Amino acid sequence: EYRRLSAQGPVPPVAMAAYMKSARQRVSHLENLRIFDADGRVTHADVPLDPARPVSVADRSYFQRIRTEKGLIFAPPLLGRISNQWIIPIQRRIECADGRFCGGVGTSLPTASISKQLATLDIGPHGAAVLFDAERNILVRHPEPKGPGSAIGLKIGSTEFQALWRDGHTSGTYTARSTTDGQLRVYSYRQVGSYPLFILVGISPDDYLQPWWNHLRAALVFL
């Protein structure tokens, strides 16, 4: 839509804001929607912008990536400057008619909303569920080892996982002790559709063997 409007001249801020607001309503779980130019200055958003307080994303790592990368980019979590919450930036570059980099369109997904979804999984009191990217960066972990945001910056690093990862497996199952909390678990992971994202779930023997131990205790009592 931005390319279509820009082909006709300067993009009208009111018209673009109205379009972005309607798009934002269709994906209400996202935190914001905005467009920035080739210098990283935010020019359009689904909320009114204050001219006296310009916003720039030029110093963000994802801005440097979209200058050279195409497709949808998921950046590692960062602390939002406005919301003061941990968010996952999602960006896509905008190209001019001649293919030059003209800026990008971006939004963000609060890590708390993903954590709530992971919390609905029945993984037992010692289990763990993780969303990580193609560089093995942990984006969201449930439960978090030391409170909100404590898993951000960590990587999936067990020897057993890395052996599968090096061989190019986008899904697999293995048993390992977590490098995050030291808990022994059986893990399974797989890619999320065609996105550069992966979901990993680990269940502890302390949990999945509990019914067997209960049965054994009952059998011993009868014996």
Image (cartoon, grey):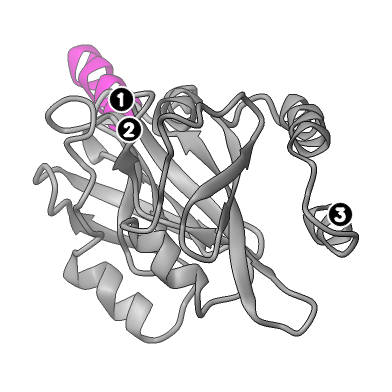
Instruction: Name the residue at 47% across, 77% down.
Output: 169
Question: In front here: 199 or 133?
Answer: 133
Give neighbour class at mark 3: few <14, some 14-19, many 20+ (Cα, 10 Å). few
Question: Is residue 11 shown left or right of residue 197?
Answer: right
**Residue 214 among magenta residues:** yes
Secondary structure of the residue carrying tag 1 is loop
Q: Quadrant of residue 206?
A: top left
Residue 183 in picture, x, y percent from top left: 14, 43
Residue 73 in picture, x, y percent from top left: 53, 62
The amino acid on which the numbered mark 3 sits, given as a three-letter code, is Leu
Q: Is residue 111 above or below residue 47?
A: below
Residue 153 in picture, x, y percent from top left: 20, 52
Secondary structure of the residue carrying tag 2 is loop
Q: Are marks 3 and 1 in contact (CB under 8 Å)?
A: no
Q: CA distance from mark 3 to mark 2?
A: 29 Å
Question: In front here: 150 or 110?
Answer: 110
Q: Which residues are magenta?
A: 209-223
Instruction: Name the residue at 34% across, 45% down.
Output: 77
Question: Is residue 172 shown left or right of residue 29?
Answer: left
Residue for badge 1: 84
Instruction: Name the residue at 52% across, 46% down.
Output: 42
User: What is the number of the mark on residue 81?
Assistant: 2
Question: In front here: 135 or 198?
Answer: 135
**Residue 220 among magenta residues:** yes
User: What is the number of the mark on residue 5?
Assistant: 3
Question: Counting residues from the N terminus, which is met first, the one under dot 3 or under dot 2?
Answer: 3
Q: Is residue 94 above or below residue 115?
A: below
Instruction: Name the residue at 21% across, 42% down.
Output: 151
Question: Counting residues from the N terminus, which is met first, the one under dot 3 or under dot 1?
Answer: 3
What kind of secondary structure does the magenta stretch mostly adopt? Answer: helix
Residue 190 in picture, x, y percent from top left: 51, 60
